[in-house]
Image (cartoon, rainbow, N blue to C red):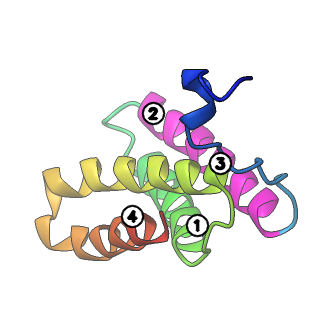
């Protein structure tokens, strides 16, 4: 590139960090959550026992995810996706239940 090349003035992206350790665990939990979410959606609405069990499992996984702080962009995006799913569900049935998820989104935004 020359000094007159418009690409020369563009800010460079920092190199991507590899996803390992803490974020690898976070990404695995997010995948577990997404599978649990899909499975819960597939349960017939009249099967209260199965729905309750699926929701408890999903909430337990969500709680673990919310307790983790992402260290990479991939971890941040995965956690945000889970948070948004939980927000959508809680807004429908329990508007008061969204407060912890709003705080999580705020933390994600501040982390940049």
- Circle 2 is placed at which residue position? 43
Q: Position of residue 42 (x, y in %)?
A: 47, 28
Instruction: Tell me the chief SS of the magenta region.
Output: helix
Q: Nearer the viewer, mark 1 or mark 2?
A: 1
Q: Earlier in the sequence, mark 4 or mark 2?
A: 2
- Residue 109's label in the rendered image is 4
Q: Position of residue 8 (x, y in %)?
A: 63, 31
Q: Is residue 21 above or below residue 4?
A: below
Along the line of sight, which residue is nearer the eye, 35 or 56? 35
Q: Which residues are magenta?
A: 22-42
Secondary structure state at the residue bearing disc 4: helix
Q: Position of residue 89 (x, y in %)?
A: 27, 50
* C-alpha distance separating marks 1 and 3: 14 Å
Q: Is residue 43 above or below residue 37?
A: above
* C-alpha distance separating marks 1 and 2: 23 Å
* C-alpha distance separating marks 1 and 4: 16 Å
Mark 3 and mark 4 residues within 8 Å of each other at the beta carbon: no
Q: Earlier in the sequence, mark 1 or mark 4?
A: 1
Mark 1 and mark 2 residues within 8 Å of each other at the beta carbon: no
Q: In the orientation shown, which residue stands out farthest toward the front?
A: 3
Left or right: 108 as drawn, with respect to 100: right
- Circle 1 is placed at which residue position? 65
Along the line of sight, which residue is nearer the eye, 16 or 81? 16
* C-alpha distance separating marks 4 and 2: 34 Å
């Amino acid at each position: 590139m020359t000094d007159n090349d418009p690409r020369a003035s563009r800010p460079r992206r920092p190199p991507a960090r590899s996803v390992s350790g803490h974020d690898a665990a976070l990404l695995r939990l997010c995948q577990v959550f997404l599978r649990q979410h899909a499975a819960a959606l597939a349960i017939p609405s009249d099967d209260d026992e199965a729905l309750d069990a699926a929701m408890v499992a999903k909430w337990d996984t969500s709680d673990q995810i919310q307790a983790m702080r992402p260290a990479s962009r991939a971890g941040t995006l995965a956690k945000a996706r889970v948070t948004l799913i939980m927000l959508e569900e809680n807004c429908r049935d329990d508007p008061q239940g969204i407060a912890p998820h709003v705080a999580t989104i705020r933390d994600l935004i501040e982390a940049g």
